[in-house]
Image (spheres, rainbow, N blue to C red):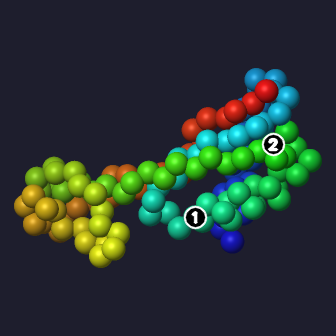
Amino acid sequence: MHELSVTQSILDISLEYARRHRAEKILAVDLRIGEVTDFDDEWIQRYFDFVSKGTLAEGAKLRITRIPAKLQCNSCSSIFPLDRSTWNNQCPSCQSKDTQLISGREFRVEALEVN
């Protein structure tokens, strides 16, 4: 259900931008969402359809790009993808488990298509 509050924020950001730029209609919203977020693309669109009724964004399509999860080793600075099948965070270069997530949790409005 947390998709609802996040989707309301997407709508608020989109409407504010559209108003500032005197757009007549929001046709699409481009989102960048990290792959380790637990947001479901289909539910985000459904909630967006619900909260955008009667606004400039009614009927707009959400175009979602998933950002891969990457880790950085704190020991050797190597950057590598997170293996989501095992959630293994061990550095393949030096075998250290002292790593940090550096991408994959993003959630941002990247662009709007308006007319």
Q: Position of residue 31 (x, y in %)?
A: 59, 46
Q: CA distance from mark 1 to mark 2?
A: 21 Å
Which quarter of the image is occupied by the C terminus? top right
Instruction: Sort mark 2 into few (<14), some (14-19) or many (20+) by Cα contacts within 10 Å.
Output: many
Q: Is residue 88 above or below residue 9?
A: below
Q: Position of residue 106 (x, y in %)?
A: 48, 51
Amino acid on which disc 2 is placed = Ala
Q: Is residue 72 above or below residue 26?
A: below
CB within 8 Å, label 1 to label 2 = no
The residue labelled by disc 2 is 57
Residue 105 showing in the rendered view = no
Residue drawn at x 16%, y 51% is: 78
Residue 115 showing in the rendered view = yes
Residue drawn at x 31%, y 55% is: 70
Left or right, 107 with respect to 54, comes to: left
The residue labelled by disc 1 is 39
Q: Quadrant of residue 87?
A: bottom left
On residue 61, which mark appears? none
Amino acid on which disc 1 is placed = Phe
Q: Quadrant of residue 105?
A: bottom left
Q: Position of residue 58 (x, y in %)?
A: 84, 46
Q: Secondary structure at mark 1?
A: loop
Residue drawn at x 18%, y 68% is: 90
Q: Secondary structure at mark 2?
A: loop
Judging depth in this view, the residue of 46 and 36 nearest the camera is 46
Left or right, 82 with respect to 73, comes to: right
Q: Position of residue 15 (x, y in %)?
A: 78, 38
Residue drawn at x 29%, y 67% is: 83
Which quarter of the image is occupied by the N terminus? bottom right
